[in-house]
Image (cartoon, grey):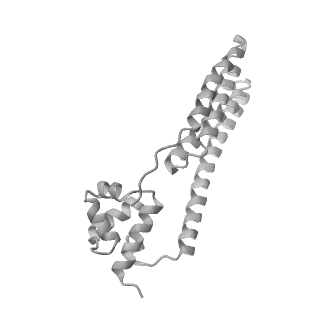
Amino acid sequence: MKNISQIVAENLISLRKKNNLTQSEVACKLQYSDNTISRWEINEASPSIDTLEKIAEIYNVPIEYFFKEHTKESVEKDERLQKVNKISSMLLMISAIWFVATIIFIYGQTFFNKSYWTVFIWAIPICCLVLLLFNEVWGKYMYKFIILSVLTWSFLVCLFFQFLEYKLWLIFFAGIPVQFGLVVWSFVKPREKKNK
């Protein structure tokens, strides 16, 4: 059976790697040296309870997490649950946008006898902005190209329909260099962090 300091060391390593942080980045957040972080992870020393509380805040886990062994299955189950929660919160935000758009449409039709149908078109780029925000927060960059492309073209469509009487169909030419820039940008690979 593993001793408690070994369990803490293993949990420190797994949480750091799960959060894509280097030992230097963790050291910077805690205001310790990377040598200290390394010593904790190879079980040469252990962090104090106060320091474990700070680490728990960084990784958003309860302090008890460090003192229990976590099987691969339980870690995968926690990751699935976190993923479901993230997707649910994103879908809730998007449904709120469409709900507001529907309320505006109904309100305009009922009280002003005007059809604000363009509000549904404007909901698309707003949803893209929300998706972009969630994408940045979660650190998943694989969908960024698609979201930015849809954002660009849906915004141009919104402008076209909003100012329909001006016949702004030439505005779609503005999307061509933006799309070209997005394609080129998608081939640029971000620098990878070095994990110790």
Report the quarter where the N terminus lies.
Answer: bottom left
Task: Classify residue 159 by image quadrant.
Answer: top right
Task: Name which residue lies at 45% across and 57% down.
Answer: 20
Residue 108 is situated, as x and y percent measured from the top left of the image, at 69, 28
Residue 19 is situated, as x and y percent measured from the top left of the image, at 45, 58
Q: Height in image: 55 above or below 10?
A: above
Left or right relative to 170: residue 141:
left
Task: Name which residue lies at 38% across and 59% down.
Answer: 58
Left or right relative to 52: residue 172:
right
Task: Classify residue 115 by image quadrant.
Answer: top right
Task: Name which residue lies at 69% across and 37% down.
Answer: 102
Q: Looking at the image, which is closer to me, 10 or 97? A: 10
Q: Height in image: 190 above or below 161?
A: below
Report the quarter where the C terminus lies.
Answer: bottom left
Left or right relative to 6: residue 134:
right
Residue 80 in view here: yes
Q: Looking at the image, which is closer to me, 118 or 39? A: 39
Task: Classify residue 48 by image quadrant.
Answer: bottom left
Task: Name which residue lies at 41% across and 58% down.
Answer: 195
